[in-house]
Amino acid sequence: MLRELLRYLDLEASVTARRPESPGDGIGQASAVLDIASEEDLGLLIGRKGTTLAALQYMVNLITTRGMTEPFSVTIDVEGYRKRREHTLNQLAQRAAERAVTTHTTVTMEPMPANERRIIHIALADHPQVMTKSIGGGEDRHVAVSLR
C-alpha cells in the first residue's frame, strides 16, 4: 500500500520492513518499521519538522488497520530521518538535564509531537537528578525538565 502511494506521488523508492529497534522506531508501540529509500531527494516526504512524514504515517496506519481486530501500527522512516532525529532529541534531552541541574530551574523544551516527547521522557527516565513532564496542550505541548 505504501509503495502504491509513493507511485501516485511519482516517486521511485524502495520500501523495506523491519522490526522496531528503538524509541524513535516506536518500539513497544509499532508492529513494524517501513524504511523508504531512493536515489531521489525525499525531503518532500519528510516535510518541515517531519510533518509530512507524520501525515503519511497516519494515513498508512488508518488505511491498513481498517477492519482489523488486532492492534497493529507501523512507523515510517525516510532515509534514516527518524534515527537522526532520535539522536538529536537524545542530545537535546541531555543538554536540558545538564542545564536544569546547573541552574536549579525547570527547563522547558520546544513544542513537539507525542512521539518526540516520548523519546525525551525515555532518554531521561533513569537520570538520577531530573524528571520530565509533558505540559501544555495540542500543538503547544512540550516537555519540562526539572530537578527531582
Image: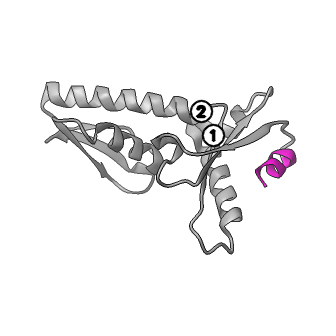
Instruction: Kindly identify which numbered label has been placed on residue 77.
Output: 1
Question: Residue at horizontal 40%, vertical 49%?
Answer: 140
The majority secondary structure of the magenta stretch comes to: helix
Q: Position of residue 56 (x, y in %)?
A: 67, 50
User: Taking 65 as reference, is 11 left or right?
Assistant: right
Question: Residue at horizontal 87%, vertical 41%?
Answer: 10
Q: How many marks?
A: 2
Instruction: For label 1, count other residues whose C-alpha is less than 10 Å away and answer few (under 14), some (14-19) or many (20+).
Output: many
Which image quadrant for residue 67?
bottom right
Question: Residue at horizontal 33%, vertical 53%?
Answer: 136
Q: Position of residue 135 (x, y in %)?
A: 30, 52
The boundaries of the magenta stretch are: 1-8
User: Taking 135 as reference, is 54 left or right?
Assistant: right
- Residue 93's place in the image compared with 139, above or below, is above
What kind of colouring is applied to the model shown? Answer: one colour
Q: Position of residue 123 (x, y in %)?
A: 34, 37
Which image quadrant for residue 60?
bottom right
Which image quadrant for residue 20?
top right
Instruction: Kindly identify which numbered label has been placed on residue 81.
Output: 2
Q: Secondary structure at mark 1?
A: strand
Locate the C terminus by quadrant.
top left
Question: Residue at horizontal 86%, vertical 46%?
Answer: 7
Q: Position of residue 62 (x, y in %)?
A: 66, 63
Mark 1 and mark 2 in contact (Cβ < 8 Å)? yes
Q: Amino acid at mark 1?
A: Asp
Closest to the observer, 44 or 25: 25
Q: Amino acid at mark 2?
A: Tyr
